[in-house]
Image: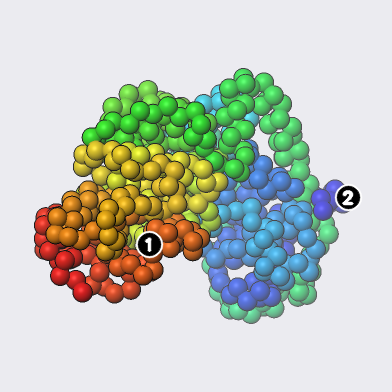
Amino acid sequence: MKLNKNNNNPINHEKNINELKSLSLDISESNNIGLNSDILEYSNIIYTLFVNHYNFLVDNKTFYNRDRLIIGKVDIDPVLYAAYFLSGAEGDIKDLENLEYLEENYNYFKKIPDALSYSVGASIGEAHISSLLNINSVSYKIYGICQFNALSNGINIESARFAGENKLNNLIIITVGDSSVKELYESLGFNVYSALNEHDSIDKALNDAKKSDKPSLIIIDKLNIDFDITNISEIKNKLGVRDIKFAISNDVMEDIQYLINEREKNLEKNFKDSIASLTPESSLILKSLILTNKRVSSSNIVFIPNDGASTLDNSNKLLESYIKNSNNLIFASTNLKEYGSISDSQIFNSNNYKGATINLENNLYSSGFIINGLTESGLRPVLETNAKTARYFIPAVCYARHVSLPVIYILVNDKDDNQDISYLRETTDIDMFTPFDANEVIGSFKAVMNKEEEVSVILVTREESKISESSSINDTARGAYILLNERLSFDGTIICSSSSVNLAVSVREILFSRGLDYRIVSCPNIKRFLKQSEEYKDKVLPVEKRKIIIENSNSTYWNRVVFNNKYILNYKDFKTFSYDAKKFADKIEKLK
């Protein structure tokens, strides 16, 4: 409940901060979160952000034009819960003893493993949308609170360099530490500000950062904590607050809410007034960004596949059509040469934030978290990258899957990259399509674009591939289907995907010439197939018939379909036989 300021006392920031610290410690203790120095060191920062800078609506946590608050590996959740409560967020003081309630209702902020890279993605999204719509009200800051030690790791240096090169001045990174990274971040294109760990100094640094023409890093001094952090009574005594659990002065709540309400009272109105003047086209764009449903319709897609071209080439042309017909898709690539001809006017950079193609060529390690951050502005990012880099962004994929971000990966695969793909699929249990021809590429895109959320992967190759007369666009979404039926007898089924399909078809013909009649089942998405009805699964793969896998991988997923490993012809066989169909046929013929 929002409070009015009914007291005539001057604002006492020190008193307010001390009660914020006290409440944070109580939340931490009651919920067994663990007491740590971060709670005290970051309380001044959080308080100053909330009362002077951080724009949000306490009654509308999804307000589009709010500032984004991204938290890295610092243990300050109790401080944030306390700050939102004191700001007037829904709930009674007793609710602060219920961690489940806090996590569900006070989730205004994002807790991200690689907060800096995610924050860079969020800042790209804001810069792109505000430039695209050209209205002042779509303008917000990204505050990334990062652990000091993380600033020197390769992932964050990669993404920080991108932010500096593109002058993303909406990005403000805050940390508690020393000046040892100052020169590094200045060389990366940041303005670096130092501040004492007290309200006025932090406030000045934030004001300077908000005026910066570059991304900013604010380094706050560490507090001198010379007492037992686990002794809450001693801490409260030093802070000059009552040693009563969850005791908060009404004057403190009034003051904090007064400061926030005065700054934000026109935030929502200004946004509504501004968007009322948008063109119909811009209104549709903004509406698609605000809506939680991120499905992209396939009904207006015009695409004539190139028979004989690679699945990569057909994928790129199809994706172009989707981007042209969508208001929320944005494309990023770690190798634009793979994508084909991209004009300079399409590239996102400091002179062209409208550009809807993001060149992440030097961001192999950080690209996953950067595109995760793009979703903060309501965009649905598509990242094209080489399959060899798959293991680099597994943490980003795991995070995206955990919180259901609508991110799409287009992975470009070589014949020798399948171990990385298997590792990605096994560790993330991701929704992955491995189409073998243009029809399955179309079916994969339709299935992925039709999802509201959840990260997806489409694996494509550089190999030329003829369009099969029996491949199915619609059945691709079911995960597996009968590509070629048996002709006379029914001796078993060969299950395959991606570039292994054409090999399997050749193997089938050799076996047929030897009197063995095999069905071919294309399985572009084994995870989806396993979720089909028992009736459909038995129709495609009858229980009583032998099943043989041909796939250049070491995926354990196939053990859910074939229980005896001798019927799984995987990367070991490909290493021995290469793509020699006769040798594969010889081995299958000898199987008992």
For the question of whether residue 578 can be seen, the reply is no
Amino acid marked by disc 1? Leu
From the top left corner, tell me how far across and down residue 324 is, in percent: 45, 27
Amino acid marked by disc 2? Asn
From the top left corner, tell me how far across and down residue 42 is, in percent: 57, 60
Identify the element where label 2 is drawn: loop
Q: Nearer the viewer, residue 161 or 485?
A: 485
Q: Residue at x 59, y 43 (%)?
A: 293
From the top left corner, tell me how far across and down residue 123 is, in percent: 49, 40
Quick one: label 2, few (<14), some, or many (20+) residues within 10 Å? Answer: few
Q: Which mark is residue 110?
A: none
From the top left corner, tell me how far across and down residue 18 is, in percent: 69, 63
Which tag, 1 or 2, sits closer to the chain's start? 2
Q: Which numbered disc, 1 or 2, marks the residue closer to the eye?
A: 1
Residue position marked by numbered label 2 in the rendering: 6
Side of 533 where 311 appears, left or right: left
Quick one: label 1, few (<14), some, or many (20+) residues within 10 Å? Answer: many
Q: Which mark is residue 541?
A: 1
Q: Are marks 1 and 2 in contact (CB under 8 Å)?
A: no
Q: Residue at x 85, y 48 (%)?
A: 4
Q: Residue at x 65, y 63 (%)?
A: 103
Q: How is the image coloured?
A: rainbow
User: Which part of the image, by quadrant, shows the C terminus?
Assistant: bottom left
Measure how far apart labels 1 and 2 are at the Cα level. 73 Å
Side of 278 where 176 appears, left or right: left
Q: Residue at x 84, y 51 (%)?
A: 3
Q: Quadrant of residue 133?
A: top right
Q: Quadrant of residue 287?
A: top right
- Which residue of the protein is positioned furthest toward the right in this rendering? 6
